[in-house]
Image (cartoon, rainbow, N blue to C red):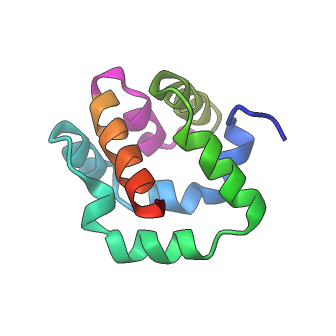
Amino acid sequence: MSDKISYEDIKPYEKLFTATPAFLLERFAKRNTNFVLKFKSKVESFLDGLDDNQKKKLDIVLNSDTDELQAVMADAYEKTNIKQYKILANPKYKEFIQININEIENMIK
């Protein structure tokens, strides 16, 4: 397994990225909302169901630079044209991603 995340790694989780309508996701991103905390029970349930391979991938995500993660989102947008990926790839929403990655890290400690 590579120590970098790619579109192929996130593809199986596309439903998670599209569960929130794009206009709402952008609103949350503009406000730097702690999205993970808002949906804490669902996120905890998801995290509890991860197998070892998925946990390793999550660890890679959590240890990746935000710019790298946004590059993966940009790649995903190019391949799928899913607006949620475009929103997450936007550099002005870097803080939103960092806030939510930090929240996930806090949940798994």
Q: Residue at x 58, y 55 (%)?
A: 14
Measured as percent of width and height from the top left, residue 15 is found at 55, 62
Looking at the rendered image, the quarter that the N terminus falls into is top right
Furthest toward the left, the residue is: 31
Main SS class of the magenta portion in the image: helix
Residue 92 or residue 4, whichever sits in front = 4
Measured as percent of width and height from the top left, residue 96 is found at 29, 38
Measured as percent of width and height from the top left, residue 81 is found at 54, 38
Measured as percent of width and height from the top left, residue 78 is found at 59, 29
Residue 80 is left or right of residue 16, and the answer is right
Q: Is residue 88 above or below residue 41?
A: above
Q: Is residue 102 above or below residue 55?
A: above
Q: Is residue 9 above or below residue 54?
A: above
Q: Residue at x 24, y 52 (%)?
A: 34
Q: Residue at x 19, y 46 (%)?
A: 27
Residue span colored magenta: 80-92
Q: Is residue 56 above or below residue 70?
A: below
User: Residue 107 appears in which quarter of the rendering?
Assistant: bottom left
User: Residue 36 appears in which quarter of the rendering?
Assistant: bottom left
Does residue 83 belong to the magenta stretch? Answer: yes
